[in-house]
Amino acid sequence: MLSLLGVLVVIVGFALKLEPIAIIFVSAAVTAVCGQIPLTELLETVGSTFVANRTQLITLILMILTGTLERNGLKEAGAELIRKLKGLSTGMLMAVWGVAHELFIIFKIPIGSIPAYVRPILMPMTVGIVESNGRAVAPEHEETMKALYGMHYNVGNFFGQCCFAANASVLLIQSTLANIGYEVDVMQIVRVQIPVAAMAMVMAAVYTLVVDTRMSKKCYGAVMKTQK
Amino acid sequence: MLAYFMDAEITVSAKLVQIMYVLSGLFSIYCGVRAWMKKDNKYYLPTGLFWTLLGVVVAFGQWLPPIVSGIIVAVICIPAGLKMVRRGSLEAASKEEQVRNFKKIGMKIFIPALGAAVFTILISIFLPGWSSLIGSLFATIFGVILLVMWNKENKPMVFLEEGRRFLDMSSAVFIMPLLLSCLGAVFTRAGVGDAVSTLFGSIIPAGNLYIGIIAYAVGMVLFTAIMGNAFAAITVMTVGVGVPFVISLGANPLYMVTLAMTSGYCGTLLTPMAANFNIVPGVYLEIKDKYGIIKMQVIPSLIMLTFQIIYMCIAAGFSF
């Protein structure tokens, strides 16, 4: 039970809003001491896990491109694109993007990451809708848009990914079931997930429309749409 | 290292992935060295140390002994944990410059922007067995070539400095998800999972299927929220709660374990521990309230959790 002290460090650390990396560092140290893991073994565990999982830092290479794309007018191009869409409200644009994003996740097409697409393309498009009505975007509305994009991205990603048979999460479910004595095919797992993915898609789109409509009415007295 | 690239046993795909890590790492080292040279924030020494050492372990991790990588990771946690990794003074190009460049290049700027997606799809269709990650490498090379052709002002330094601006903006939180994976491995090694199942066993009454299902699903949410990772939670919770309190009562194991996993994702939506999903995107979007995305996710998360618990209660009776 002593090994739970490391978990306690994490809970207390985050509750007190301490620096996350410091919390992880201390938690690992406490866990190692309580679990009597020798220092060399602790360092080896950390080193090999870090190296094996550094795919998570893959955006490093794309950053070389992303910043220069912005400098060369990608944001302006996004704004230009929105001027061509007719009668689309800010909430509709976000909801349409969210549904498309989840479909891309289900088919394992990585379109729409936050740094590569939402920030340089979709945010300027959404803000552009408000500006095309001759209004400056309200700071409160802009913050809501950012949070909605973050939410829609995560919901689509989490609940869509289990519909792709070779996804790591599906394989983990399969191996967890095998560990407790049940052999299943990955497609059986996918079928269980379909109602969850569908529910997530509808729920997130409706939620976005409701939140954005309320915020628009509060900030501008009307829903902002592109000109017909 | 040379032997690795000469080895015919290792696939081209694996070699290209390593090349991508080497280039990514060198870029991080560049950012570290620039921070030292420019001295444009008070903590330029620890900031430079952080990015340089991170670059070393990203680029050469494949060939470093695990203990050396472990020591480097421990060392870079020090400036990061003490909040000594700070932004430099780089600013985005002015609106005028962006408009001027847009007039020069026009809508075809979308071609390099869509590169990562297009290359990834092409690889998955035409090169089965290859890592789709390499799409990012090809997209970067292809994008840089196009941008140089279209605009003579895009010199090598422009790419590097614009990239450094983005890396500066993402700050040390950038590596937090990876550090969490490491913490998860340490937890597993120390037997934290067993301790948790003992703990749950002492507070859940056995014999009621619906209470068992709620404990399994909500337990996944809580454990995932603490760890920031549903993957770490599912094994522990299934052995500790799923089997003794749900599946042993005759509930369909396929539905129970599968839905417990995605119930765990409701926990991911609620926690700053899942920084790569809940905090880092906010940084990219320059959101003012760093918990803004999590706050927006509370209602969707609770709706999805309720939906899945009801689904589990109905599906428990399905024959396996």
Image (spheres, coloured by chain):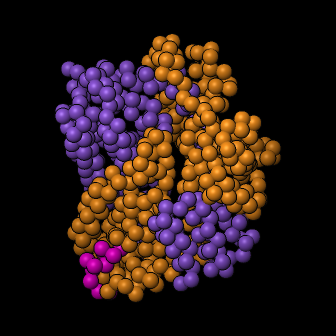
Chain colours: A purple, B orange
Residue at image position (67%, 66%) is A45
Of residues B53 and B60, the one drawn nearer to the viewer in this rendering:
B53
Q: Where does residue B225 sit, x and y in percent of width and height?
A: 43, 64
Residue at image position (42%, 21%) is A77
Q: Where does residue A41 sit, x and y in percent of width and height?
A: 71, 71
Q: Can the viewer see residue A103?
A: no
- Residue B190 covered by magenta stretch: no
Given the current orientation, which residue lies at the most extreme front position?
Answer: B42
Quadrant placement of the C terminus of chain A = top left
Q: Can the viewer see residue A6?
A: yes
- Total labels: the figure holds 0
Residue A188 falls in which quadrant of the image? bottom left
- Residue B212 covered by magenta stretch: yes
A81 relative position to A133: left or right? right
Q: Where does residue A1 sit, x and y in percent of width and height?
A: 53, 84
Q: Where is A209 relative to B150, above or below?
A: below
